[in-house]
Structure formats: structure tokens, C-alpha cells
Image (cartoon, rainbow, N blue to C red):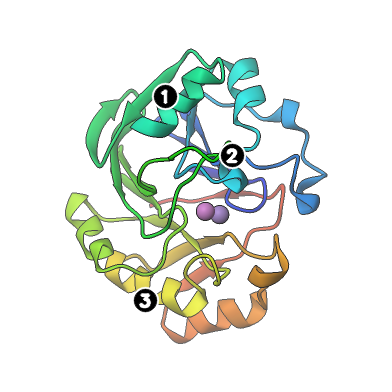
């Protein structure tokens, strides 16, 4: 599985033969100015919730790529109102796509859209495909619901927020990794804004002290993960 980091909580994975882009937020991010929006490819764009730091670049990327947008029902209706035609609205539950089985699971956060309208419930996504288990938590605090995630199958890679303040911090992300039963985590949602600046080396060492691996990606970095 290939993972490309675009900064904040925006990343692309290639899984089940498809390119899946999550939470596009690049042009407003001062740390992501090295990323060209037009270079980003996507077959699907998945949104965790409606906050601007997760949807800001949705419309131009969706329109250029023709990618199918997957989001909760309220955000999917908002996306249609922005002129995006390929939209799949869902809610907590699972469905099958050509890239694998997708499960939308709860996150503990909030979800208003950039125009202030209601953004439905914030969520995360599990994908199980070709024997690979992937989980993206979205923006969330630590919740016991994460203990349900391995019931869908083992998680080989989890993408968790680690910046604190708006989401889990590093210590809670390590606790989440226990709940998920996953020892390999990519951290996101850090350093973008002053309240979420972290010490990356200390974060990596904290995970190591719990016998887990934390990857703190660099913007533009490509990583490859096996099972
Ligand atoms: Ni948020
Ligand atoms: Mn956020």
C-alpha cells in the first residue's frame, strides 16, 4: 500500500487498485505550499467531517479528477450543492466499493461546514481489502468505540491525529492504537496551527516506549507499507 502525505490530515493511499484521497486541505496550509493541487490524482475523495481544514480544496480536485466523493449524508448533499456530481452519501455502517469494503465509524468531534451549515456526525473510515486492513480516525478524541474496529479484521496501518487540542494527542493516540490492536501508526493533524505543534522525536519515542511504531510523515513524502 502506498501512502502520500499532503500535510495536516490530507493524504492519498493506493489500495485495492484505486487512489483514495482523504480530507483535502492544501492551498490554505502554509506548510503545504510545495504541493501542487493539480498534481494530485484521485479515484475517490473521502471526507471525515465538514471542517474547512478537511474540505477546503475538495471542489477543485473533485472537478478536475472526476473522483467520487464519499462522505456522510449531510456533507454529500453540501458537495452536490457545490456542483460536484459524483457523490456517495452514507452514514455509520458499511458498504462495498471496487477498492474494498468501507466502514464509516464514529469519531468524537464536531462537524460544521464552511458556510456554517450542519455537517452531520464526524466519522472515520475502515477499509478492508486484499487482506489489508486500514483505519483513518478523522478528527477525534479517544473513544472506547475504537475497540470495535479490529472486529472488522486486523488493522495493518492506522492514521491517527496526534496534535492534541482539537483531537487526541500523542499519548491518547498510543492508547487508541491499543484499542485498535494496531502497532503501526501514521500521525496526522499536527504542526499546522500553533495549538497543535508537537515534538516529533518525543512522539516517536513515546510510541516506542509502548512497543509501537509512530511514523511522523514529512509533507510530500511517499511511504510504502506491507501487511
Ligand atoms: Ni475538525
Ligand atoms: Mn481538523
Q: In percent of the image, x 64 and y 69: which residue is there?
A: 196
Q: CA distance from mark 1 to mark 2?
A: 14 Å
Q: Secondary structure at mark 3?
A: helix
Q: Quadrant of residue 188?
A: bottom right
Q: Are marks 1 and 3 in contact (CB under 8 Å)?
A: no
Q: Residue furthest front?
A: 116
Displayed-image quarter of ligand 2: bottom right
**In the image, is residue 160 above or below residue 82?**
below
User: Mark 3 CB in 8 Å range of ligand 2?
Assistant: no
**Of all residues shown, which one is farthest toward the bottom?**
209
Give the x, y percent position of residue 112. 49, 45
Residue 102 spot, x, y in % from top left = 30, 37
Residue 122 rendering spot, x and y as whole percentages: 39, 48
Q: Residue furthest left?
A: 151
In this rendering, the answer to whether 96 lies above or below 31 is above
Residue at image point 44% right, 44% down:
48
On the picture, is 33 further left or further right than 13? right
Dot 3 corresponds to which residue? 175
* Mark 2 crowdedness (10 Å alpha carbons): few <14, some 14-19, many ≥20: some
Residue 165 visible to an observer of this rendering: yes
Separation of residues labelled 1 and 3 (CA atoms): 35 Å
The nearer-to-camera label among 3 and 2 is: 2
| Residue at (75% x, 44% y) in the render | 28
The numbered mark, 1 or 3, whose residue comes first in the sequence reads 1
Q: What is the secondary structure assignment of the residue under circle 1?
A: helix
Which residue is disc 2 drawn over? 114
Mark 3, other Cα within 10 Å: few <14 / some 14–19 / many ≥20: some
Q: Earlier in the sequence, mark 1 or mark 2?
A: 1
Q: Name the residue that disc number 1 marks.
A: 77
Residue at point 67%, 45% (across, down): 6
Amino acid at each position: 500500500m502506498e501512502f502520500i502525505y499532503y500535510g495536516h490530515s490530507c493524504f492519498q493511499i493506493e489500495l485495492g487498485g484505486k487512489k483514495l484521497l482523504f480530507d483535502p486541505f492544501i492551498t490554505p496550509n502554509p506548510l503545504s505550499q510545495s504541493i501542487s493541487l493539480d498534481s494530485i490524482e484521485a479515484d475517490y475523495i473521502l471526507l471525515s467531517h465538514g471542517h474547512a481544514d478537511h474540505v477546503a480544496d475538495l471542489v477543485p480536485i473533485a472537478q478536475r479528477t472526476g473522483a467520487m466523493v464519499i462522505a456522510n449524508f449531510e456533507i454529500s448533499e453540501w458537495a452536490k450543492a457545490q456542483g460536484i456530481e459524483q457523490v456517495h452519501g452514507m452514514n455509520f455502517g458499511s458498504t462495498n466499493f471496487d477498492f474494498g469494503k468501507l466502514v464509516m465509524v464514529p469519531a468524537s468531534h464536531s462537524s460544521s461546514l464552511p458556510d456554517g451549515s450542519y455537517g452531520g456526525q464526524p466519522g472515520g473510515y475502515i477499509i478492508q481489502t486484499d487482506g489489508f486492513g486500514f483505519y483513518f480516525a478523522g478528527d477525534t478524541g479517544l473513544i472506547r468505540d475504537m475497540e470495535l474496529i479490529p472486529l472488522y479484521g486486523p488493522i495493518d496501518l492506522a492514521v491517527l491525529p496526534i496534535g492534541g487540542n482539537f483531537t487526541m494527542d500523542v499519548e491518547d493516540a498510543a492508547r487508541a492504537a491499543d484499542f485498535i490492536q494496531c502497532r503501526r501508526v501514521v500521525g496526522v493533524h499536527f504542526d499546522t496551527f500553533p495549538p497543535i505543534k508537537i515534538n516529533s522525536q518525543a512522539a516517536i519515542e513515546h510510541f516506542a516506549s509502548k512497543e509501537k511504531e509512530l511514523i511522523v510523515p514529512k509533507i510530500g513524502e511517499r511511504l510504502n507499507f506491507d501487511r
